[in-house]
Image (cartoon, rainbow, N blue to C red):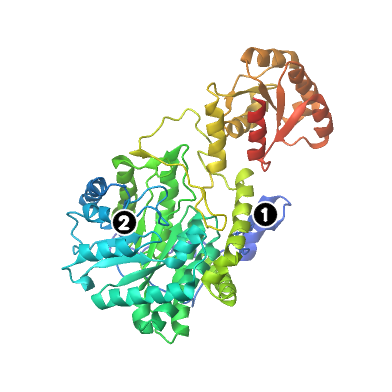
Amino acid sequence: MAATETATPFADVFAPASEEQWRQKVEAALKGAPFSRLISKTYDGFDVQPLYARASGKPRAFRGAGDWAVTARVDHPEGAEANKLALTDLENGANGLHVVFAGSAGAYGFGLKDAAALALALEGVYLDAGLRIVFDLPGDTAAIVEAIENRVAGHDLKTLDLSLGLDPLGAAALSGEALDWPKAGLALAARVKALHEKGFGGVVAADGRIVHAAGGSPAQELAFALAAGVDYLRALEAGGLSLEEAREKIDFRLAADADEFVTLAKFRALRRLWASIETACGLTPRPIRVHGETAWRMMTRRDPWVNHLRSTVAVFSAGLGGADSITVLPFTQAIGLPDALARRIARNTQLVLLEESNLGKVADPAAGSGGFEALTESLVERAYSLFQDIEKAGGLARALASGLIGGEIAKIANERAKATARRKEPLTGASEFPDINEKPVAVLIPAPAAPAANPKALAPQRVAHPFEALRDKAEAAGARPKIFLANLGPIAAFTARATFAKNVFEAGGIEALSNDGFADTAALAAGFKASGAKLAVLCSSDALYAESGVAAAKALKDAGATVWFAGRPGDLEAALREAGVADFVFVGSDVLAQLTAALDAA
């Protein structure tokens, strides 16, 4: 650009648009539909608007400076094998380890088998090289903590970045067993004080991942972590630590899922919530240590490659939301113990976002965004209200024992299950766009069967499991069940609904047999007979349904088919059912129940 030239004043070229003008455009696009169609509601009960004004003057709570730590899982049961995998991760870009023990909140079927495995697992790992080490401990921690103390002996503990993760309240929630908190709190305080005197930093973990994995909402996850943190703060102060010392011993852990906006806001909200607790205690708020882990709940066994996409969104959101360290569950975690390839991709997911996209360079990039600030504020308000309910119940241990927390989480989990069954919350590769011819992926050890859980336990669950169970049932029969796509009329008439029907039935492991369509009902019935299928789904346009849908359904029924109908039947429902239609599949129908019935009939 020449010295005399100036930049184009874009702000003057494009006149600013007002919200009123935007609404006029929206109303025209909606063609008479209510504006409320653009407003979504979260499981925590607050609205998400389609447009927000710029926010200003909102309080901010920063994480520490610099990139978040890339922590790789150390979860092979055998210490020596876990060590090989961990060293490979550290040699190829990871700068932290997430050491998982069997039976812990983050185990998901695996983890170091015992305390003796720890020394082998961390052989050759230079703890004083700036590594972030996060431990996931089971309920019985005495032997493991002793093993950790032995491993770090001789180090200046003030230079190590360790998060031991003592969490008796979380262990009680995970097991469903009642906890005598006054007694357990005193024991925890004595242990933490002893570790404090030896120089340990982060010792206790307030872990919200347990609530997320059990199906809870973001505000429930935050309230649980906040309540645990406050109970630990009280216990440590009663055990002889000052409030200043006590807060330095508490770390936080949250799950990150593929709901980008809410996840980002959730991590921001935690810092705001804890800052308010510190202020109420007479402390000047300081940055807390928050560890994020991509959510177990969103992982799928079917078409696991899509887990890469979900995990990338989760890391992006947790990182921009202010996580200090993040662990990515490898994409095969739900299938078995991940191999080197899966671990490499998990590691590189973070490295690409950090080193190529520079996502860790801005302290709080969502600050001032109307949408993110509104979501953060809503989560803060809802989570604090739930936290107050826990306090009124006498603290977290009593709220768990009374069923208050479990009951509320179960309500949300049931709502989510209904939304999943109707594909209002689709899971690509499981409930939507399934690949029934997918090739198996390699794992080191197949996943064990989930143990029977205490009914009071906040047991981890995956949203995709019901659909995966149907796929397993379909494939256990040997020959895969089939459904004939009864395409009536020209291609333009049936393609949309045939594609929809194929997507629906293959989500249950029922192979859809396609064709180029049939001109009349006789040819349609003959085509079904030739297919060898037991099921048929009628696919066509509304116009052809009105003209010959009933006759086509009767012809298929007479030919021996269990007949399904793609689309809403409208005024034809009674006639179609009389003609033999078993059920109707459409956007919003209970696909899970329909697939269960279809498999029974196949």
User: Residue 494: x percent and y percent?
Assistant: 66, 27
Discs 2/1, front: 2
Which residue occupies the foreground of this view, 218 or 452?
A: 452
Relative to 188, is 343 above or below? above
Q: Which residue is mark 2?
A: 99
Q: Which residue corresponds to the image point at 57% horizontal and 72% vertical from the top-left?
A: 390
> Label 2 vs label 1: CA separation?
45 Å
Q: Which residue corresponds to the image point at 38% horizontal and 49% vertical from the top-left?
A: 329
User: Residue 240: x percent and y percent?
Assistant: 36, 84
Relative to 397, is 507 above or below? above
Relative to 312, is 389 above or below? below
Please tell me how crowded label 2 is: few (under 14), some (14-19), or many (20+) other residues with Cα within 10 Å.
Answer: many
Q: Which residue is mark 1?
A: 37
The kind of secondary structure element at disc 2 is strand
**Kind of residue sitting beneath label 2:** Val
Image quadrant where residue 282 sits: bottom left
**Kind of residue sitting beneath label 1:** Arg
Locate residue 332 relative to residue 424 in the image: left or right. left
Which residue occupies the foreground of this view, 514 or 339?
A: 339
User: Residue 126: x percent and y percent?
Assistant: 18, 59
Please tell me how crowded label 1 is: few (under 14), some (14-19), or many (20+) other residues with Cα within 10 Å.
Answer: few
